[in-house]
Image (cartoon, grey):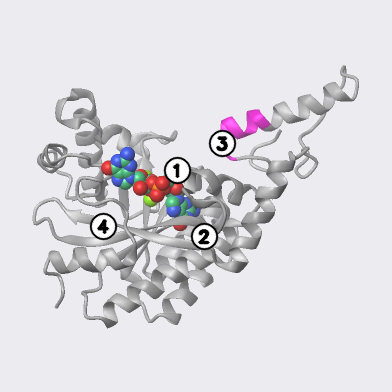
Amino acid sequence: SVYPDHALKASDLVSRAEKALHIAKTNGGNRYELYQPGTVTKTLERILLENELRRSVEAQYFELEYQPKIDLHTKHYIGFEALVRWVHPDLGRIPPDKFIPLAEETKIIIPLGEWILNEACRQLRQWIDEGYPPLQMAVNMSSIQLEDPNVDLVVQAALQRYNIQPQWLEIELTESAFADRKELSETIERIRAIGVSVAIDDFGTGYSTFSYIKELPIDTIKIDRAFVQEIDNNKENQAIVSAIVTLAATAQLQVVAEGIESEHEGEVLRELGCEIGQGYFYSRPVAPEECVILMDEHHQKE
Ligand code: C2E
Ligand code: MG
Ligand code: MG
């Protein structure tokens, strides 16, 4: 299986090579096979699930929950991250980890991602119209969506449709979007040229080295929960976070710590120079009606 045509991640390349191996063996062995997208034998469950996912995009069986990002000094809300949930009439509420990989593989993520982006912008517009200050809305985007060279036009259309200033929107991308593929970084630059900021999500879990931070076309680094967990008594994690904070400062990037689960973790992160945090301690991702209650409690209505 060949990078980058068949997969972007090493683990996916290996599993695709294994599929080719399986075909070589069933065809008698002692031969070579190249992975062929589409010729993979799909299980019945898989076909049913894929059809169900496709149907659900048309029927709009999806909802967005929002998790606040907070200023670790003032404890004020500075934004929300939109997180998608598949709400299926028979199967119930399905978390993104269970269907985003399938949506990516089948490219269903392209129409689904467009719906997510528009819904997040629509929601932000509604809150602004209700008198809440324009907090920044972060939307996760898959690298499959970035492969569409017109994705910047999709972003621009959503901003215009709901009269959203570009600086109120942030796009979160994982490291695979930056895996030296020239076309993708050009697309990222076009999104930034609109005035929308770009964050690197789950930072530290991929393969980019720290020194690489300066070269990335980004505005924000989101430090993965793996480094935030028990930061209050893990010296190694403290050293990693402070190295990221220092490098980010020289590159003038914003740093967000993800997955803060206790007050003490938040305090330690703030002392290490991390300004913004997100995590269950402050709030889980919640339905829009609950966001409004949270914003009211924080006296953030103008
Ligand atoms: P992510 O973008 O890194 O989002 C953070 C995940 O960590 C969310 O899980 C969130 O609920 C969870 N989380 C937040 N705070 C804490 C905490 O304090 N402790 C723990 N244990 N977990 C915490 P969720 O909503 O299940 O989403 C998982 C992943 O699915 C996301 O990771 C993102 O990569 C993907 N995803 C979610 N929504 C979308 C979307 O709209 N589009 C795309 N392309 N991907 C999405
Ligand atoms: Mg995210
Ligand atoms: Mg993350």
Magenta part of the chain: 8-15
The residue carrying mark 2 is 187
Q: Is residue 9 rendered magenta in the image?
A: yes
The residue carrying mark 4 is 68
Of badges 4 and 2, the one in the foreground is 4
The residue carrying mark 1 is 175
Kindly report the distance in space between the C-alpha atoms of the residues bearing marks 4 and 1. 22 Å
Q: Is residue 191 rendered magenta in the image?
A: no
211 vs 117: above or below: above
Apparent side of residue 37 relative to residue 229 in the rendered image (left or right): right
Q: Name the kind of residue labelled 4 in the image.
A: Pro
Kindly report the distance in space between the C-alpha atoms of the residues bearing marks 1 and 3. 10 Å
Q: Name the kind of residue labelled 3 in the image.
A: Lys
Of badges 4 and 1, the one in the foreground is 4
- Which residue is farthest right? 28
Q: Earlier in the sequence, mark 4 or mark 3?
A: 3
Q: Which of marks 2 and 3 is nearer the N terminus?
A: 3
* Residue 11, numbered label: none
Q: Earlier in the sequence, mark 1 or mark 2?
A: 1
Whether residue 215 is visible: no
Dividing the picture into quarters, in which one does residue 233 lie?
Answer: top left
The residue carrying mark 3 is 9
Dividing the picture into quarters, in which one does residue 202 lie?
Answer: top left
- What residue do we see at 31% from left, 57% from top? 286
79 vs 209: above or below: below
Residue 90 percent location from the top left of the image: 57, 54
Residue 254 percent location from the top left of the image: 25, 52
Whether residue 263 is visible: yes
- What residue do we see at 65% from left, 30% from top? 15
Foreground residue among 238 and 122: 122
